[in-house]
């Protein structure tokens, strides 16, 4: 059987790698080197990541001496680069047939580490209201942009999941939207608010197998980006991406006092760690909360 080390050696020989990439590769070699690559499991990756987090940052060694831990924690973005590096190794292994093409890499179900949301990089409820008002005026042809925005903000679903929703996955009576496969590889059932139900009820309901947000040109999903950019520009939010609505959903829930565990369920996270990124508020948010409580 092909070992993890053998795959890595072939990968390194195939192209150049920067020093940072080689350092991350070496970490994974230290963890899995002699193990047959087919036998590395998601649990093995989890344990290795726990060791990585416990180790923290390293101070480069001098004159050939090994690097030493600094005692400082690794940033979420750094941990995620280690995960991406490992995923790349497994992708290469499938490409060179060290693994079957049907092999599911053990990184597939690994939740990415939280990367703190910049206070300026999420939509607040009043900003979403502005977006919707503009969308109703700008979107005279497709007439679905306001519904896409409302569902994006109220469910926290990623835009890819929303655009691939079919009518058979929408249950207005049960007030749910079912996503077969999310980014972390798991199914997810998103609750629908009154506002979501209202927006969906306005749309022309197609065949159960048709997309809710279908293109008016073909059977594929609507190409929303140009219209989204236009709506954002008109509303004064030029440069913002649709993903800010997902961050806005998590932040709004946290600001309202919703528990981290409940945010995890609403957002479809697999771990509490991923939901921790939304447990923040800026000074204005905190002042507003205090003002409501202590009138």
Image (cartoon, rainbow, N blue to C red):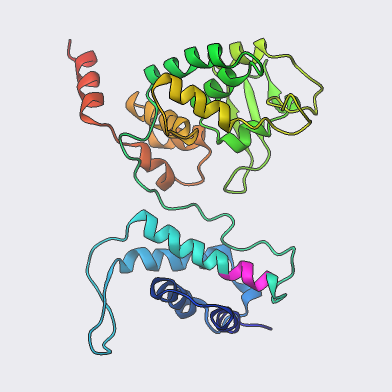
259 is higher (above) or lower (below) than 173: below
Q: Is residue 152 visible?
A: no
> Is residue 273 shown in magenta?
no
132 or 197, which is in the foreground? Answer: 132
Whether 90 is among the magenta residues is yes
Q: Position of residue 94 (x, y in %)?
A: 68, 70
Q: Quadrant of the C terminus?
A: top left
Is residue 266 at least partly visible in the picture? Answer: yes
Q: Tell me where residue 242 appears, x and y as whole percent.
A: 50, 33
The residue sitting at 49% across, 25% down in the picture is 153
Quarter of the image that includes the N terminus: bottom right
Furthest residue in direction left, as rendered: 294
Residue at x 46%, y 30% (from the top left corner): 245
SS assignment for the magenta stretch, majority: helix
Is 217 situated above or below 101? above
Q: How many marks?
A: 0
Q: Which of the two residues, 164 or 14, is positioned nearer the viewer here?
A: 14
**Residue 56 drawn at (x, y percent):** 30, 66
Q: Position of residue 5 (x, y in %)?
A: 55, 83
User: Which stretch did the figure color magenta?
Assistant: 89-94
Compared across the picture, whether 164 is left or right of 206 comes to left
Q: Quadrant of residue 192?
A: top right
Residue 266, compared with residue 70, is above or below; it is: above
Query: What residue sits 73% from the left and 14% below the top?
Result: 204
Q: Is residue 294 above or below residue 97?
A: above
């Amino acid at each position: 059987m092909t070992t993890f080390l053998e795959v890595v050696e072939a990968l390194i020989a195939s192209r150049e790698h920067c020093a940072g990439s080689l350092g991350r590769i070496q970490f994974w070699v230290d963890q899995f080197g002699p193990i047959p690559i087919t036998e590395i499991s998601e649990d093995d990756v989890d344990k290795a990541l726990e060791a990585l987090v416990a180790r923290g940052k390293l101070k480069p060694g001098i004159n050939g001496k090994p690097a030493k831990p600094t005692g400082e924690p690794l940033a979420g973005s750094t941990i995620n680069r280690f995960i991406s590096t490992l995923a790349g190794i497994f992708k290469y292994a499938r490409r060179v047939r060290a693994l079957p093409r049907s092999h599911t890499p053990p990184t597939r179900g690994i939740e990415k580490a939280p990367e703190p949301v910049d206070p300026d990089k999420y939509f607040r409820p009043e900003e979403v209201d502005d977006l919707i008002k503009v969308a109703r005026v700008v979107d005279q042809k497709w007439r679905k942009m306001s519904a896409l925005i409302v569902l994006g903000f109220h469910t926290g679903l990623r835009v890819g999941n929303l655009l691939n929703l079919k009518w058979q996955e929408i249950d207005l009576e049960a007030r749910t939207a079912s996503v077969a496969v999310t980014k972390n590889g798991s199914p997810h059932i998103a609750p629908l608010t009154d506002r979501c139900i209202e927006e969906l009820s306005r749309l022309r309901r197609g065949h159960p197998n048709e997309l809710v947000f279908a293109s008016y040109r073909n059977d594929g999903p609507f190409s929303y980006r140009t219209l989204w950019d236009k709506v954002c520009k008109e509303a004064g939010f030029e440069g913002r991406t649709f993903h800010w609505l997902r961050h806005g959903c998590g932040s709004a829930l946290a600001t309202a006092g919703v528990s981290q565990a409940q945010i995890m369920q609403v957002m479809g996270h697999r771990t509490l760690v991923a939901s921790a990124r939304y447990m923040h508020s800026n000074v204005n948010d905190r002042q507003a909360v205090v003002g409501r409580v202590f009138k």
